[in-house]
Amino acid sequence: QVQLQQSGPGLVKPSQTLSLTCAISGDSVSSNSAAWNWIRQSPSRGLEWLGRTYYRSKWYIDYAVSVKSRIIINPDTSKNQFSLQLNSVTPEDTAVYYCAREAPSRTLWYFDYWGQGTLVTVSS
Amino acid sequence: EIVLTQSPGTLSLSPGERATLSCRASQSVSSSYLAWYQQKPGQAPRLLIYGASSRATGIPDRFSGRGSGTDFTLTISRLEPEDFAVYYCQLYDTSPPMYTFGQGTKLEIK
């Protein structure tokens, strides 16, 4: 059974960096078939995919165009986890942030396991 | 970027009734890229359907998905009290690689 456990602060000041971590159990961040994603949800923007990292003989990372200039997603193989950094945050970045596993399929694309969600509020 | 439009925004039905939720893509897409999720307050989305019509593990058979091209449907044959929630469709796009979600349909008790 795959479990994703999120951690990180729930309050970030404007212009600072939002940092979250997603610890994986029951699978590996270095899986050759799954991918590891960050998704956020807010009343104004709905569910918004932010990016992913995955390993296919080497590491790949994809980012959403909307945040590409200020996002970093990193895998951490030593701790079997992956992280999200979002720089220069504004109140518009206030949302519930989720990590999610993209299912290990080469022909179908969907998220089969999700973290518990972290409400991040951007406020001074 | 492909846009997903879900309708209706809110659906008011009674337990035992049939629910039909729609998800329309702004251009033709592969069924392999289409999934449906259920979300209850304070919870993460839960996978219901993948590949437009395959039920996820543990999902009751009253949930079914169908469609192709630009029009996809999630049907709940006989509503149970626990089915009242918000439902989202999701699409994967390959160029550039990205996921998009519909804005959701709220299924509420009439």
Image: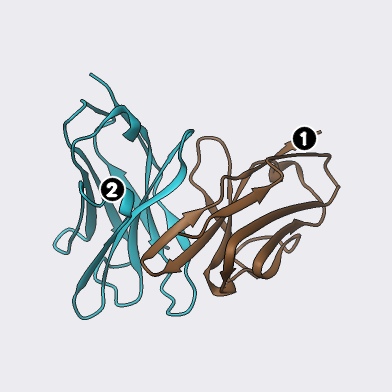
Chain colours: A cyan, B brown
Q: Is residue B17 above or below residue A18?
A: below
- Disc 2 marks which residue? A67
- Disc 1 marks which residue? B109
Residue A105, percent from left and from top? 44, 76
Cα separation, mark 2 vs mark 1, equals 37 Å
Residue B3, percent from left and from top? 53, 55
Could you tell me if the residues under marks 2 and 1 are in contact, i.e. CB atoms within 8 Å? no
Closer-to-camera residue (A39/B79): A39
Dot 1 falls on which chain?
B
What's the amino acid at mark 2? Val
What's the amino acid at mark 1? Ile
Binning the other alpha carbons within 10 Å of mark 1 as few (below 14), some (14 to 19) or many (20 upward) gives some
Residue A58, percent from left and from top? 18, 76
Residue at position x 65%, y 41% in the image: B85
Binning the other alpha carbons within 10 Å of mark 2 as few (below 14), some (14 to 19) or many (20 upward) gives some
Q: Quadrant of residue A117?
A: top left
Q: Nearer the viewer, mark 2 or mark 1?
A: 2
Q: Secondary structure at mark 1?
A: strand
Residue at position x 60%, y 60% in the image: B25
For the question of whether residue A2 can be seen, the reply is: no
Q: Residue furthest top?
A: A124
Side of B19 where B56 appears, left or right? left
Q: Is residue A76 above or below residue A54?
A: above
Closer-to-camera residue (B3/A59): B3
